[in-house]
DNA sequence: TTTAATGCAAAGTGTTTGCACTATA
DNA sequence: TATAGTGCAAACACTTTGCATTAAA
């Protein structure tokens, strides 16, 4: 519980440093995401928070802001839009390319793709019940020298 | 061009075998997806087909039907919903999940993610000069039994 | 000739925006 | 006390549905 306060405080600093304010509503939204520890849809958050007088528009507006500040990430699936905390996520993954002719191995940094894959991990976790902790990917083919 | 007629005919057989009819509208929607060879949003299709008197509702209804029949697949991203032919797609890659506790290995089928990754492969090929022929992905974590 | 499929318009979703008011820094 | 943030309701965009009509088998 102390940890949650610390994390919220950390996010508050980010907000203040960018000229935004930490409000009761933002505090509650972040706390909810921290406590539930999974992705939520906007209306699920609203359901949870409306008794505290927090409006749906506020939730949408803040999720948008949190996305811009890289605090939250959006996940799109057939069921709709989900949101989850991105900032304290420890998820990482590596991608390697291996040339099937000369055997050379290279690291690949494709940020958007990694981001995308990590998003889908949530979907897979939901569908399967697995808990994914690590992802690695190997691409095989020909490097530019061996392509000829 | 002959190939397109053949493919449409193949889909017609599927429709008829399930008690559906092949209409001008369905023909046009499938032809559009075959010709453009990429994913389209419903309103893009409407834009393309409304001069033939095809309504937006018809497009939505048929995309839904085609999805059920595994003819078309839906892709959800931040920009919105896309649709593409699934039935003649040669795309493949394998994804495995390995439980780090019990060692069990399972196949993962997450079409949208696969589609996404294959798209990024084009980007990586462009950036690196590599030619990617095969992709495999391993996810590690805990299966539902070992999570407990 | 039977029954599935269509176009249109109306109704539903989920999401964003304008505005007067409120609360944070 | 200045200005960012809020709730509410209206507006919006996308999608689905009801119904009278059309067309495929």
Image: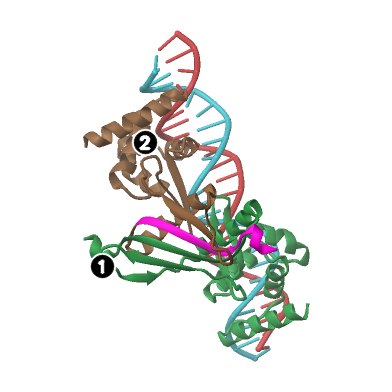
Chain colours: A brown, B green, C cyan, D red
Q: Is residue C16 left or right of residue A79?
A: right
* Quadrant placement of the C terminus of chain B: bottom left
Residue drawn at (68%, 68%) of the image: B33
Q: In this picture, is A89 found above or below B135?
A: above
Check the image and name the residue furthest to the front: A102
Tell me where residue C20 appears, x and y as whole percent.
49, 23
Q: Main secondary structure of the magenta part?
A: strand
The magenta region covers: A133-148
Residue drawn at (74%, 80%) of the image: B3
* Quadrant placement of the N terminus of chain B: bottom right
Crowding at dot 2, Cα within 10 Å, few <14 / some 14-19 / many 20+, comes out as some
Can you identify the residue that label 2 sits on? A54
Q: Is residue C23 left or right of residue A2?
A: right
Residue drawn at (57%, 63%) of the image: A102
Chain where mark 1 sits = B
Q: Is residue B140 left or right of residue B70?
A: left
Q: Is residue B143 left or right of residue B1?
A: left
Mark 1 vs 2: CB contact within 8 A:
no
Tell me where residue D7 appears, x and y as whole percent.
40, 33
Residue drawn at (46%, 40%) of the image: A60
Chain where mark 2 sits = A
Tell me the SS state at disc 1: loop
Q: In front here: B88 or A44?
A: B88
Q: In the rendered structure, find residue B102 and report the number of the disc placed on it.
A: 1
Q: In front here: A7 or A133?
A: A133
């Amino acid at each position: 519980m102390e940890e949650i306060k610390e994390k919220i405080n950390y996010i508050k600093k980010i907000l203040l440093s960018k000229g935004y304010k930490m409000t009761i509503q933002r505090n509650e939204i972040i706390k909810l995401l921290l406590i539930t520890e999974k992705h939520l849809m906007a209306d699920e958050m609203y359901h949870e928070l409306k008794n505290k007088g927090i409006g749906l528009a506020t939730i949408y507006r803040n999720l948008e802001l949190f996305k811009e500040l890289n605090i939250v990430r959006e996940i799109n699936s057939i069921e709709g839009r989900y949101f989850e905390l991105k900032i304290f996520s420890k998820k990482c993954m590596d991608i390697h390319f291996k040339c099937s002719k000369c055997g050379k191995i290279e690291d690949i940094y494709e940020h958007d793709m990694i981001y995308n894959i990590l998003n889908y991990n949530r979907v897979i976790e939901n569908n399967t019940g697995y808990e994914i902790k690590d992802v690695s990917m190997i691409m095989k083919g020909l490097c530019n020298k061996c392509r000829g």
